[in-house]
Amino acid sequence: MTFIFVKLRRPPTGNIALLLRTRDCFPTLAPRSRWPRGQWHESARLPGRPDLHRWSSVGAVVDVAPELDEVRAAEVIGSFCLATDLAIGLPFEHGLQSTLVAMRLAERMGVDPAAAKQTYYGCLLVWAGCTTDAEISSELFADGALLKYFNPVIFGSPAETLAGIMKALADPDSPPLVGAVQGAARLPGAVRGHQRHIVAMCEVAEMLCERLGMRRDVRDLVRGFTARWDGKGTPRDLGGEQLPVALRILHVATDATFQCLLGGTDHVLRLMRDRSGKAFDPDVVAVLAEGIADIFAFDDSGSVWAEMLAREPGETLMLRGAEVDRALAAMGDFADLVSSYFIGHSAAVAQLAGAAAARLNLAPRDVVSVRRAALVHDLGRVAVATSVWNKPTALTADEWEHVRLHAYHTERVLSRSAALTKLGSIAGTHHERLDGSGYHRGVTAPSLAMPARLLAVADAYRTMIEPRPHRAARSPEGAARVLAEAASAGRIDPDAVAAVLEAAGAAVPRMARPAGLTDREAQVISLVAKGLQTKQVGHRLGISAKTADRHLQNAYAKIGVSTRAAAALFAMQYGLTSWGELPIPDTGQRS
Ligand SMILES: [Fe+2]
């Protein structure tokens, strides 16, 4: 299965027309009478390796880069697991460590291959629903209170669990006695909501797992996480060997890894023995107790990412084409769940950024990258408390610092995976501005290629037309005006603004270019900076070489330069081009 891009040159005929007309191959194409020519169109999943020569009879054809066409599922869900660490407030890679503990247990127990797979994917995705009801939780509990008081007793006795919830409900600064009263007063409402929350969390986790390409048995495992060995979990009376062995391993691995964080392996052993036969399968606890030193042996100086990938049981699970988009969209939705203000934001930005990239005729692989980076651009939001996102008044300096770093967290989560690193580096720049006034790094125009610029503008546009706790939504016209002003001031790219607004169906206001250049002169300078000769510039823009030269001379006069080198420097300074677009030869290892 593969994907191709086709740019139509002429109306297709014969078998190709038939294929296109089915719209199974090119679902974005309109009926034949309105097939747009001169734009790249991405195919749906095509069987096998398509005959590119056949397709070239109607237009230019490009294969999608293999790294975009096919991604290891373990890399995607491993990255998702890192995001769940951030959402819960756990150390980075904690979920990966839990998975390794689970797989080491599964190996010692000699489980069958199907159970090993269930254990592996289930453990990586066990907290997939953790952003569900984040707003309700943030109203009931202080930041970090659930992690501190509730997580240690999730697998404890009912009395311990209740006591943990009560402590988490108290105001953090209250003296113990006052806290106890507060907890008791708030408990009935919290317990009532707790049951609904658990159901919602499990349902959301299951739905996200389905979109991440997980089989039914893994989805069932995640959905049934709240069951217990003694039948006192949810669903009630389901316990013992009725529970899949993968779930029994997952329970022990998840809790043991967390308890190890709190008190080391001696603490783990004490607690596991206490919970054996209650929350946990005694056989799994016995295996853990016997090999605890080896099972918890991690190389603290390095990442556990590579071992996590190496531990994938059986055949490597791959996501291909639309499956990759679907999985990344699930991750974006997971992040959007942190606040009702963000619901649908990531998907809408992706749709807009992808459409704008196609309008700008970016290379097909860049169109795919922009769309996929947009799907996950706000993944790092989960690292910031919902109470901060939902605050209706001005943020404190500390809160702003957390917000500022969400783009960094996005990049961090995606940086472990070789297949997702490039998406992460685009996604991590979505708040950067050409003049260096953005965040989180404050980079300037030369570091921001068009995919990053498009994502920044699409995100800014969608954000403005969506309501936020501290302001109402702007009208599309108002948002377009703000974008045009920012483009005229050199903060964002005018071409990206025009493409995004056109893709959104909004009118494009006039935007001032640096040094009073016209749009055409700016295009000419940009192409000259990229190393094109005047004749090539004319060809690229569909104008004669003579006209191109006239625009170039006019631009030189406005800028006040007379050489291509100086024009290239101007293009860099004012964001007409970026480092990646300059004709700098690859110097290999030389620095
Ligand atoms: Fe953001």
Image: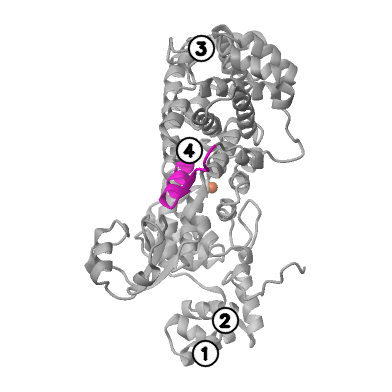
Q: Where is residue 542 in the image (x, y as percent from the top left)?
A: 42, 83
Q: Helix, strand or loop at disc 2?
A: helix
| Rendered image quadrant of residue 55 | bottom left
- Vertical arrangement, residue 297 with respect to residue 366, above or below: above
Q: Helix, strand or loop at disc 3?
A: helix
**Between discs 4 and 2, the one toward the N terminus:** 4
- Which residue is label 4 attached to? 334
Q: Comparing marks 3 and 4, which lies closer to the viewer?
A: 4
Indicate the amino acid at tag 2.
Answer: Val
**Between discs 3 and 2, the one toward the N terminus:** 3
Query: Magenta span covers which residues?
Result: 314-333
- Which residue is label 3 attached to? 187
CA gap, disc 4 and disc 1: 51 Å
Neighbour tally class for label 3: few under 14, some 14-19, many 20 plus, Cα within 10 Å: many
| Residue 456 located within the stretch drawn in magenta | no
Q: Helix, strand or loop at disc 4?
A: helix
Numbered circle sitting on residue 528: 2
Q: Label the magenta part by its dominant secondary structure.
A: helix
Q: Where is residue 243 in the image (x, y as percent from the top left)?
A: 47, 17
